[in-house]
Image (cartoon, coloured by chain):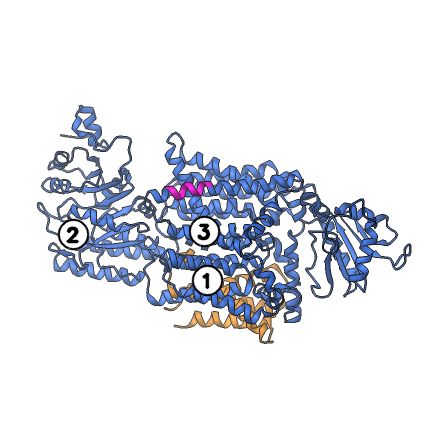
Chain colours: A orange, B blue
Amino acid sequence: MTAVRPRWSVIALTSAALAVALAVAQVHSPLRVLVILWFVLVCPGMTIVRRLRITDPAAELTLALGLSVALATAVASIGLYSGLWSPGATLGVLVVITVVAAVLP
Amino acid sequence: MGIPMGLSVRDVAEREGRDDARPRHAATASPRVSAVIPTLNEAGNVGWVLRRLPAIVDEVIIVDGLSTDGTIEAAIAARPDAVVVRTEQRGKGAALQAGFAAARGGIIVMLDADCSMDPAEIERFIERLRPGVDLVKGSRFLPGAATTDITPFRRLGNGALLALVNRLYGERFTDLCYGFCVFRRAALEGLRIDAVGFEVETQIVVRAILRHLRIEEAPSLESPRHDGASKLHPCRDGMRVLWTIAEEHRRSRNGSGPAPPRGRATFALALVPLLALLVWALSLRKVNPDIIGPTGLVSVLPALAFVALAALTVSFCVNLGRSRTPTWLLVAHVAALIVMLYGLGAAIEPEPAFEPAYRHVGIAGYIAQTGGLNTSIDAYFNWPGFFILVAFLSRVAGLHDALTLVPWAPLAYNLLYLAPLLVILRALTADRRLIFLGLWLFYATNWTAQDYFSPQAAAYLLYLVVIAILLRWFTPPVERTTPGRRAAVLAIAIAACAAIVSMHQLTPFAVLAGMTALVLFAGCTTRLLPILMAALIGGWAAFLAIGFMDGNLSGLVGGVGALGGTLHSNLGARIGGDPGHRLVVDTRLALTGAIAAFALVGWWDLWRRGTSVRAATVLGLAPFPLLGLQSYGGEILIRVWLFALPFAAYFAAAGMVAIVERVRAVRLTPALAGATAVLLAGFLFARYGNDRMDAFSRGDVEGVQALYRIAPPGSELVAVSQPLPWQSRDYASYDYERLTTLLPGPPPAPDRPHVPLTYRIRDVLRSTAPGRAFIIVTRSQIAGDELVGTGGTPASEVQRRLSVSQLFHPVYRNPDAEIYALRSRPGSSA
């Protein structure tokens, strides 16, 4: 595993910041829906998968989608089953995963 | 003897009437193995090389760079059937490009003419080119190999450049700058080689790595050349190799891959999918969904939409037939097809389609509002992964409910399926025609409509991800990678498996069947993964779905082995209804039959040619045992076909190509365009043929909204039949029933004491609904009855009886929907 390439780190961190900002500001617009879907379904997984340095974009996206969906489902489900249902906190955990994976050397 | 430029020895020999210059193989038969040998003043060597070629080589291409020492004459003397291609462009790479273009064999050997490589090794190389391997490259540094030709300086340079390539791409090759290789033709064409000098060997290896070709190394002995001097300049050519490595790496980082062909033709071809999409979108602007006929959406599609689809199909087939078409352009065509086929609903239908999608929105809404599950309501809450994910997403996205997402679900899901499908097909073959035609057929024939807003659609995405991982990284021939990377992708597969188990009842069994089949029959190395998957399925049922399993175990396992009943509920009970619906069902059967027939031909052809078919075969067959487990509400056959379709489509693509190649009078592009156009027309009937009932009008939806306004929470809401766009809100606040469930079976026979229908409805409502009950009948329910029938009193007849009954009174009415409530006393208003 190696550090994530800077360009993707910038995209992932910007997406995370935008997702949080739109959610906190309670903006109601299609932009918020698109940003949230993009962030949750792609960014956490892609940020981790990029560290594997897989050269094929289709394989990289496949792994990123699988990991992102699995992570979001797992984090939200653990919250719900443990009686701590909180969509905001779930988003926060995904943001932390993304940021850590993006900035770790 | 001088030979005019561009003419082969065969041409010249025929002109001069020499019999001995005829090829050894019949003129019409395709050669199996072609050897491409570049020459420049190798008169003293080429004869020895050609005479040592093994018999398996049945075509020899000599690419001569204007030799002046009698090289061509020496070549003809040693091998009269050799094809000579003369090229003015200097450089080994340029010569090889010309030779590859002239070679006709399915397997191509590349070797030097200076006697440094022993042609007798070719047979060993070809033995290593077993099914699934695309390229065998010689190595002078493997055990059993040796070189007596290389200088210490060249050895040092080769080692440094090799270390760089291995470091960049995580490989463990032992040699780099050695030009003794054997390729499959399809794999070589995909590399689009354009290097002109000695760096061509490096470009081939690096592009093969980037294209994820299966590369094997074979030990080889390198000797000093017999005659003449080497044309290699270690410093100059070493720098060119270094530059090639850097340039290829830069392109791969930018995602641009090997340089695409330039020119107006490619640019024009790239415009076709864009223009087709534009025409398609413009043609749909004035479609009136209110006049959808019994054959579904096709009846309202304008002619221009079909023109756009036909143009895209022709353009795709033209590009598929060009070996230099860039990959992105083929992907763009498939993406445009997905938008055209699966965006139709979002573009035309005034309201989201499919009744279950509304129910799924309601369940997610319940979870979002309460932050909990109600496992006593129904099975959905026992496998809630998808609904929890949707509840979370719709909350953080600021949506009132997830209904906004429903129309876009088929389009979004199918676009998401594209990446894992591409990985799966690339793992099965290096032939780009089969990869992209397989993709095209998957999307052009997937009539199953399991991509709406549903747990099945999300679980299917993860199914594709898991299968893609297992095929690419764990099933031979596997991609070379580091142990750490392999462990990481396995962890991702396990995480995806866990998500699937939490989302869906059926898909985990399809994953389990697929991975077990791969381990047992295709050499997949993740032997413990099926056991882990079985444990996940069992663990979920035992601990997190116990509330459902406790009361429904007998119902779940009762169908095991009852194949006859399953086939009846999946086939017999579905083939019926009005003529329009029967046409839809017949088209679905015909599409399935066509793909299955092409797939059988493709399987036979690939097997006959020695291509590995094991992994694709077992994955295509693995879902079928699920038929013996459950009828799955009469849908198991549809789901089994869905899980098998990627592999059926791959074999069907191979079958189509094989048929077209056999029938020599037919050209590939028009034949494929015709065949796929017929399949696409069938798809539009099969997929959207039931839209008169599956899609809802504004009146249908407004009727349901009125029902929620009128009926106080706790009421019983009764649908006369199905489908109805309800349950997207207040999922647990009402008691939802269907009249066909409350009053099952046909009306009483005439010889039985006659109880009027409305009295029977009143009586059953009084017994099941102590509070208030409301009956809703809509256009969609009447259309559903007309199309498929319910076996009970038709919805239109129930509506007529209710409208004239003294027992019920209308509380809401629009042109498409009516709501009735039970009067407290006959004739009273409440």
Magenta region: which residues? Answer: B597-604
| Residue at the spot of label 3 | B621
Are discs 3 and 1 located on one and the same chain? no
* Mark toward the viewer: 3 or 1: 3
Main SS of the magenta part reads: helix
From mark 2 to mark 3, how far is it between C-alphas? Answer: 56 Å
- Label 2 CA crowd tier, 10 Å (few <14, some 14–19, many 20+): few
Q: Tell me the crowding category of disc 3: few under 14, some 14 to 19, or many 20 or more residues within 10 angstroms, Cα based.
A: some
Residue type at mark 1 is: Ala
- Coordinates of residue B247 in the picture (x, y in percent): 31, 55
Chain where mark 3 sits = B
Q: Chain of mark 1?
A: A
- Asked which secondary structure carries label 3, the reply is helix
Asked whether the residues under marks 2 and 3 belong to the same chain, the reply is yes
Mark 2 or 3, which is nearer the eye?
A: 3
Query: Is tag 2's residue or tag 3's residue first in the polypeptide sequence?
Result: 2
Q: Residue furthest front?
A: B751
Can residue B292 be seen here? The reply is yes
- The residue that label 1 is drawn on is A64
**Residue B390 against residue B308 in the figure, above or below:** below
Q: Point out which mark residue B233 bears.
A: 2
State how far apart marks 2 and 1 are (Cα).
Answer: 45 Å
If the image is split into quadrants, where does the C terminus of chain B sit? bottom right
Instruction: Decide whether residue B602 is among the magenta residues.
Output: yes
Residue B750 x, y percent position in the rendering: 80, 44
Q: Is residue B685 magenta?
A: no
Where residue B513 sits in the image (x, y, percent)? 46, 58
